[in-house]
């Protein structure tokens, strides 16, 4: 049984598009306080419920991006060293780099994989000389040698991009799975991630979901997961060996009737419940 710890990271300094993700952690937790702790889909529950899970906010100073990223790494490292599984609530996707740095320090570099659910590969080059933006996080993870690129699985990539923007992901050996190809296999991740012995860190960008179901995000892309598809997927993810996960890029300012934060809370809840008692794929 896993011991979870919520880590609120209200950071959006890595976003160079629409801001608003700094309010994501509070919005998700507000919805989590309303949900029950048993999944009807598989009949399992989280003992004690979500209100029993410790919460820590990593306070952000806007005057030092590098200092804040270092603080994230330190706090996540303390969480893991204390025996907790971190549930990281962002914030923009730039926060995943210091989280993975902490995981690599604890578990060993290249000793775990990443399952990344997103509309974007986030392997783009620096913007105006700045490399730690939210569109470059997985490029940075690979270049720093934290995770073997063949153990990174990017699921749900779609939409439009500049010419050559996916070349780093394709050439480095990252497993890039386009949304159309994933849907052809009925959104069954076991067709694409076959190594069940490896521990995995899970990173979920809410823009993996179609904006019809999750409009509250900074970089929405049509053609994504339905709410039903993403919830089925996260229950499948819970059957892997999960060492931690994040959910990022919820921007309540663009939301409608809180449907994005509500879905985000259910994604977090279903993954926590299923990962707490991994077993057969649902």
Image (spheres, rainbow, N blue to C red):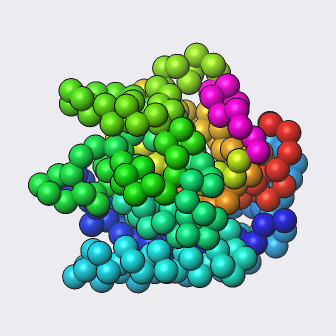
Q: Position of residue 196 (x, y in %)?
A: 75, 41
Does the magenta run of residues contain 25? no
Left or right: where 199 falls relative to 278: left
Q: Tell me: residue 181, above or below residue 162.
A: above
Q: Is residue 150 visible?
A: yes
Residue that appears at 33% across and 36% down: 168
Residue 105's place in the image compared with 215, above or below, is below
| Boundaries of the magenta span | 187-197
Query: In front: 203, or 70?
Result: 70
Task: Count every numbered label the image shows and give the total.
Answer: 0
Looking at the image, the residue that sits furthest to the top is 184
Q: Nearer the viewer, residue 26 or 136?
A: 136
Q: Is residue 11 above or below residue 203?
A: below
Task: Judge from the rendering whether residue 81 lies leftward or rightward of residue 278; answer left or right.
Answer: left
Q: Residue at x 32, y 50 (%)?
A: 136
Looking at the picture, how far across and down is residue 155, in whole percent?
A: 52, 35
Look at the image and tell me in which quarter the N terminus lies: bottom right
Residue shown at 74% from the left, 52% from the top: 241
């Amino acid at each position: 049984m896993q011991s979870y710890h919520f880590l609120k990271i209200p950071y959006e300094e890595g976003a160079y598009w629409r801001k608003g993700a700094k309010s994501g952690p509070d919005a998700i937790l507000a919805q989590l306080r309303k949900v029950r702790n048993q999944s009807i889909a598989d009949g399992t529950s989280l003992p004690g419920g979500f209100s029993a899970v410790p919460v820590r906010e990593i306070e952000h100073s806007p005057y030092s991006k590098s200092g804040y990223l270092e603080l994230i790494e330190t706090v996540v490292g303390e969480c893991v060293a204390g025996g907790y599984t971190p549930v990281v609530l962002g914030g923009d996707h730039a926060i995943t780099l210091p989280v993975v740095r902490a995981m690599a320090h604890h578990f060993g570099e290249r000793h775990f994989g990443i399952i990344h659910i997103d509309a974007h590969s986030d392997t783009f080059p620096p913007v105006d000389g700045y490399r730690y933006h939210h569109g470059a996080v997985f490029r940075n993870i690979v270049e720093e040698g934290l995770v073997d690129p063949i153990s990174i699985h990017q699921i749900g990539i779609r939409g439009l991009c500049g010419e050559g923007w996916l070349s780093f992901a394709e050439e480095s050996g990252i497993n890039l799975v386009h949304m159309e190809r994933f849907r052809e296999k009925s959104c069954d991740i076991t067709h694409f991630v076959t190594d069940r012995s490896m521990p995995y860190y899970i990173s979920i960008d809410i823009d993996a979901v179609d904006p019809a179901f999750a409009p509250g995000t900074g970089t929405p892309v049509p053609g994504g997961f339905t709410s039903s598809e993403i919830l089925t997927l996260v229950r499948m993810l819970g059957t892997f060996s999960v060492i931690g996960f994040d959910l990022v890029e919820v921007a309540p300012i663009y939301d409608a009737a809180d449907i994005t934060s509500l879905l985000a809370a259910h994604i977090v809840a279903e993954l926590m419940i299923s990962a707490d008692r991994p077993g057969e794929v649902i």
